[in-house]
Amino acid sequence: MTDPTSPAATLRALLATLVKSALIADEARLAAWRREAVALHGRLRTQDLSGLKLDGIWTLAVREAEAPDLRPDETQVSLTMPQACPLPLDAVAGPGFDVDAAIERIRKSASTG
């Protein structure tokens, strides 16, 4: 089991939070997820990210975000998430991280039905 404070777990949690935000239009949950994303980004900035495989972590994050209990609330878009992460690692972990821009980029990268 992965240490929940490891760089991989922190990155996965951040990406899953961004995907959930792209999928679900509930403003109260979006506000909570934005706060969570900012906190996770703060943790991520202090961690060594060398050696992480972004696309593998992205796949796990999408799987986590598309959990069956959230499916009824996925109203933003009818989508299939891309196999590769639409955000470069430096954008996710860098000092200029913009939560809303990241959410919008994920939303736009989805294949709509």
Image (tube, rainbow, N blue to C red):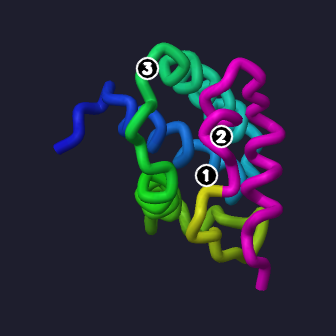
Please say if the residues under marks 1 and 3 sit with CB atoms less than 8 Å apart: no
Residue that lies at the very extreme toward the bottom in this rendered image: 113
Q: Which residue is mark 2?
A: 29
Q: Position of residue 77 (x, y in %)?
A: 77, 69
- In the rendered view, tell whether residue 103 sits above or below residue 67: above
Marks 2 and 3, the one that precedes in the sequence:
2
Q: Which residues are magenta?
A: 86-113
The numbered disc on residue 20 is 1
> What residue do we see at 45% from left, 44% from top?
12
Please say if the residues under marks 1 and 2 sit with CB atoms less than 8 Å apart: yes
> What residue do we see at 77% from left, 85% from top?
113
Q: Which residue is mark 3?
A: 47
Counting other residues with Cα less than 10 Å from the Cα at mark 3, is it few (<14), some (14-19), or many (20 or more)? some
Q: CA distance from mark 1 to mark 2?
A: 9 Å
Which of the image's four quarters has the N terminus?
Answer: top left
Marks 1 and 3, the one that precedes in the sequence:
1
Q: Is residue 105 left or right of 44 when viewed as pictured?
A: right
- Which residue type does callout 1 highlight? Lys
Q: Which of the two discs, 1 and 2, sits closer to the camera? A: 1
